[in-house]
Image: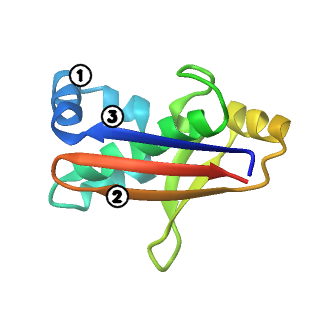
Amino acid sequence: MKGIGIDNVEVGRFRQMLARRQAMAARLFTPEELDYANSANDPTERLAARFAAKEATMKALGVGLGAFGFHDVWVDRHDDGRPYLVVRGRAAELAADLGVERFEVSLTHTDSMAQAVVVAL
């Protein structure tokens, strides 16, 4: 294991932030993430979990906010629904520098809290 990261996001606060800053969703999420989230009754829960995954990835790589762009890491899903991370650009460079060969990600959310755990292997 090269690193582990965890992050929690309060769904209500995240919802308020997205409502106040309309352009923020496009800055934080890929079109694929937005499409997936918007297929739910409450897209904010899915978006909050994905934001937590991006933050947890930074922690797993031992870097802080701004070390790579939010579009450099995103959550996709296998055919069976399991999430996985796609890492490119500066995030992929940082991972390669650490010898990271793959990531494991776990997401969970309720109507009030979203959480992600990322393990860099």
Q: Position of residue 43 (x, y in %)?
A: 23, 51
Q: Which secondary structure, mark 3?
A: helix
- Residue found at x 49% / y 35%: 55
Badge 3: how crowded within 10 Å, few (<14), some, or many (20+)? some
Name the side, left or right, on which 102 lies relative to 46. Answer: right
Q: Position of residue 37 (x, y in %)?
A: 30, 54
Q: CA distance from mark 3 to mark 2?
A: 20 Å
Q: Is residue 70 above or below residue 46?
A: above
Name above or below for residue 19 compared with residue 37: above
Across and down, in percent, residue 102 comes to 72, 56
SS for callout 1: loop
**Which element type, helix, strand or loop, lies under badge 2?**
strand
Residue identifier under label 1 = 21
Q: How many marks?
A: 3
Circle 2 is placed at which residue position? 108
Q: Compare residues 1 and 93 and report the one nearer the observer.
A: 1
Q: Residues within 10 Å of mark 1 (few under 14, many from 20)?
A: few
| Residue drawn at point x = 24 percent, y = 34 percent | 14
Q: Amino acid at mark 1?
A: Arg
Which residue is depicted at the point 22% across and 26% down?
17
Disc 2: CA contacts within 10 A as few (<14), some (14-19) or many (>=20): some
Left or right: 67 as drawn, with respect to 114: right
Residue type at numbered disc 3: Ala
Out of 111 and 44, give the one closest to the viewer. Answer: 111
Q: Check disc 3 and report the residue beneath it.
A: 25
Q: Nearer the viewer, mark 3 or mark 2?
A: 2
Instruction: Look at label 2 and name its amino acid.
Output: Thr
Q: Quadrant of residue 22?
A: top left
Give the spatial CA distance, label 2 vs label 1: 24 Å
Q: Which of the two labelled residues, at mark 2 and mark 1, occupies the earlier sequence position?
A: 1
Residue contact between numbered discs 1 and 3, judged by CB atoms under 8 Å: no
